[in-house]
């Protein structure tokens, strides 16, 4: 019974999210474009599936995974105040693992990866992009957790990260740059934010000298910065590998020609 | 039937890492048994079904409508209407976002405690509402700017890097309490429904305009939507 009530309350929230979007789309379609939507019934089915899908998705997360994950974040961060930095190793590992695994399940990242794969004609693989982003989020969140523990000011990290992004932009293949910038924004939605926020607030509450209000925020910013770096790095590595492979096949061809 | 089973298996695989991580930390690190195993199993099943339905709906509804509208606007050739649509889409999808409402409330508490506004409910509600409108407006502006970039073919890096330099400069002047919230607000604006729609719109526009490459020009709208709220929220903190 509890589940049914919960289902409808999440369904209402999801509808709150979808109704303005649907109103804008159908309003412009009717009054500005003034053309019938191609495959209207298919599109409506699609919207219904998206709403139902998100509802089931959030219901499951809120009923099963979020409570456990949040409890875990609290338990892991409840370290006694005299602890040395060494005892935070499990916190950093948890930050890394939860960052990576929630990103893999992030629906908006799946959407962007599907589109990128389609547009690039298969050059960018769905899993390659998702793993690159997941690694970026994992590194970002563990570094953000380390920052809360050590208390260094957040803007040092963010500014240093941007400097790296700027440098990489000049060297990375041109095709990847917009996608890399986008992947910063898509990583942080339904799945990642609640768990990561719990981790940040837990850490800031339990470490003396940190204020949850000032230090508890900011993990999300780390999670959106590092994927840009990791996605560009992934593209740079594949470009280098492709070059090396091309050079190798060329040199074998040459050596075959010689005799 | 086979396709359905395949996509269910795919969703399960997407979810497996979270289950493994939580299981490992619960049993090995915290050394506690898993509470409510039945509930967790049902929850996982529900997440798997949800993800499968969402991806089906994506391909049936969100991607096609985003693209078909992009083509229709490109054919119609009215830049003004396209820009109005872009602004409305950004504003409309953000203003009702639950994550944003939550962040705005937290921010108003921070502001009241920090003495930036009067410590009463009315002032806090005003502040939270103003912040929500600021963020929604900034996302509307971001999508508008991003669409204009696709139309004109401006290279994205100058705009984004310029924007980040702006973020850094404004950070120096912003009240300390607002910085963390401002940085986070960039991340909360892009919801699961907005991202596929906006991506399809950008790619659709770039493929229907001559001389634009969908890979280079089509992506990047989300990047604008996560950048502008940081700037606008800090400005809001400075001027209020």
Image: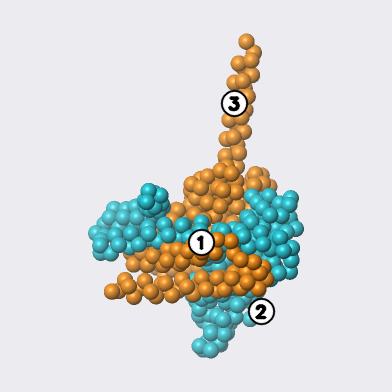
Chain colours: A orange, B cyan
The image's mark for residue A248 is: 3
The image quadrant of residue B72 is bottom right
Could you say which disc has been placed on residue B239 in the image? 2
Mark 3 element type: helix
Mark 3 Cα shell of 10 Å, populated few (<14), some (14-19), many (≥20): few
Q: Residue at x 55, y 47 (%)?
A: A117
Please tell me which residue is depicted at 61% across the width and 17% down the height of the picture: A255
Q: Does residue B174 appear left or right of residue A218 in this picture? A: right
Q: Can you tell which quarter of the image residue A224 is in?
A: bottom right
Mark 1: secondary structure? helix
Nearer to me, A3 or A215: A3
Q: Estimate the spatial distance between the alpha carbons at disc 1 and disc 3, rounded to whole Å.
A: 49 Å
- Tell me which chain the residue with mark 1 is part of: A
Q: Nearer the viewer, mark 1 or mark 3?
A: 1
Task: Give me the C-alpha separation between circle 2 and circle 3.
Answer: 60 Å
The mark lying in front, picked from 1 and 2, is 1
Quadrant housing the C terminus of chain A: top right
Residue A68 visible within the image: no
Mark 2 lies on a secondary structure that is helix
| Dot 1 and dot 2 within a common chain | no
Most foreground residue, B55 or A75: B55
Give the residue at mark 1: A42
> Does any portion of residue A36 appear in the rendered image?
yes
Q: Estimate the x, y position of residue A94 in percent, counting from the top left.
A: 39, 56
Residue A45, percent from left and from top: 48, 64
Q: Chain for mark 2?
A: B
Left or right: B212 in relation to A8: right
Question: What quarter of the picture does the N terminus of chain A occupy?
Answer: bottom left
- The chain under label 3 reads A
């Amino acid at each position: 019974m509890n589940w049914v009530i919960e289902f409808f309350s999440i369904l209402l929230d999801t509808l709150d999210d979808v109704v303005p979007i649907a109103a804008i789309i159908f309003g412009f379609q009717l009054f500005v474009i003034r053309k019938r939507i191609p495959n209207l019934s298919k599109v409506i089915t699609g919207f219904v599936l998206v709403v139902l899908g998100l509802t089931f998705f959030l219901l499951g997360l809120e009923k099963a995974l979020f409570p456990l994950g949040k409890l875990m974040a609290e338990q892991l961060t409840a370290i006694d105040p005299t602890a040395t930095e060494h005892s935070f190793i499990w916190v950093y590992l948890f930050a890394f693992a939860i960052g990576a695994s929630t990103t893999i399940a992030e629906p908006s990242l799946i959407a962007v990866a599907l589109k990128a794969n389609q547009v690039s004609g298969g050059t960018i693989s769905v899993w390659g992009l998702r793993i690159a982003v997941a690694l970026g989020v994992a590194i970002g969140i563990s570094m953000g957790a380390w920052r809360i523990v050590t208390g260094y000011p957040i803007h040092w990290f963010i500014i240093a990260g941007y400097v790296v992004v700027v440098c990489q932009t000049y060297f990375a293949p041109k095709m990847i740059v917009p996608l890399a910038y986008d992947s910063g924004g898509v990583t942080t939605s339904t799945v990642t934010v609640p768990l990561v926020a719990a981790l940040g607030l837990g850490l800031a509450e339990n470490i003396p000298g940190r204020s949850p209000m000032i230090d508890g925020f900011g993990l999300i910013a780390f999670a959106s910065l590092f994927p840009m770096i990791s996605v560009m790095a992934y593209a740079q590595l594949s470009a280098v590998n492709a070059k090396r492979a091309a050079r190798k096949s060329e040199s074998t061809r040459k050596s075959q020609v010689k005799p | 039937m086979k396709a359905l089973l395949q996509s269910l298996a795919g969703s399960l695989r997407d979810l497996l890492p979270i289950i493994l991580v939580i299981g490992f930390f619960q049993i090995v690190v915290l050394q506690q048994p898993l509470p409510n195993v039945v509930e967790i199993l049902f929850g996982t099943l529900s997440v798997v079904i949800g993800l499968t339905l969402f991806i089906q709906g994506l391909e049936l509804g969100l991607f096609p409508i985003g693209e078909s509208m992009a083509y229709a606007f490109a054919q119609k050739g009215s830049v003004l209407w396209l820009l109005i649509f872009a602004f409305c889409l950004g504003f409309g999808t953000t203003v009702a976002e639950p994550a944003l409402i939550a962040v705005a409330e937290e921010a108003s508490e921070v502001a009241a405690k920090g003495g930036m506004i009067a410590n009463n409910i009315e002032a806090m509600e005003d502040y939270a509402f103003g912040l929500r409108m600021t963020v929604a407006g900034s996302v509307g502006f971001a999508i508008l700017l991003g669409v204009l970039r696709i139309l004109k073919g401006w290279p994205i890096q100058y705009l984004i890097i310029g924007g980040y330099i702006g973020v850094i400069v404004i950070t120096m002047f912003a009240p300390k309490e607002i910085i963390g919230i401002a940085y986070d607000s960039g991340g909360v604006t892009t919801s699961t429904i907005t991202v596929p729609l906006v991506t399809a719109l950008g790619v659709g526009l770039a493929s229907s305009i001559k001389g634009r490459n969908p890979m280079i020009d089509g992506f990047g709208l989300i990047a604008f939507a996560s950048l502008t709220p940081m700037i606008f929220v800090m400005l809001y903190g400075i001027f209020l």
